Amino acid sequence: MKVGIIGAGAVGSACALALVMRGAAREVVLVDRTRERARAVATDMRYGAPLSSLVDIRDGDFNDLTGAALVMVTAGVNEKTGGATDRDLLFEAVANLASGTRPAVPAQKYILGKMVHQ
């Protein structure tokens, strides 16, 4: 099964690690607005992958998510100094992703993984 993760921050990295260590996917594609960050996270995961099931983890772009059985959207906005996440900014970022500001991501299922604190 192919799984895509949009957002290679703390939440996306934790999701990728869980997928790799549990062998829950055969292929994991990390997409981030900064391709170098996605590449670095994927490289770090591959260093530990020999200790887990056979999983191909790599960086990619939105086109690489084609055929994914699941896409986890863990991208969001960073917390402001001394405060909780601004819900309006988070909703705007997710809405931009879903409204076509980014290319459409063809997948069977989507999970929004960024929690919103009130």
Image (spheres, rainbow, N blue to C red):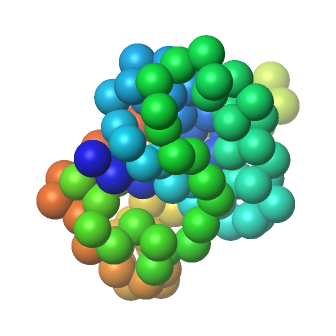
Height in image: 61 above or below 91?
Answer: below
- Please determine whether, in this image, residue 117 is positioned above or below residue 39: above
Residue placed most toward the observer, 104 or 85: 104
- Say if residue 88 shows up in the picture: no
Q: Position of residue 116 (x, y in %)?
A: 45, 32
From the viewer's perspective, is 88 left or right of 100? Answer: right
Q: x and y percent of residue 23 in the render?
A: 39, 25
Q: Which residue is drawn at 69% across and 36% down?
A: 46
Instruction: Say if 21 sits above or below 75 in the image.
Output: above
Query: Where, by quadrant of the figure, is residue 51 drawn?
Result: top right
Quick one: quadrant of the C terminus?
A: top left
The answer, for residue 98, to whether it is visible in the render is yes
Residue 99, quarter of the rendered image:
bottom left
* Residue 4 position in % (x across, y down): 42, 53
Front-most of 74 and 89? 74
Left or right: 23 as drawn, with respect to 83: left
Residue at 61% across, 54% down: 58
Q: Tell me if 40 is positioned left or right of 55 in this view.
A: right
Identified at 33% across, 52% down, the residue is 2
Above or below 74: residue 6: below
Front-lying residue, 37 or 74: 37
Q: Position of residue 16 (x, y in %)?
A: 53, 34
Residue plotted at (64% across, 58% down): 59
Q: Which picture quadrant has residue 45?
A: top right
Name of the residue lying farthest toward the left: 108
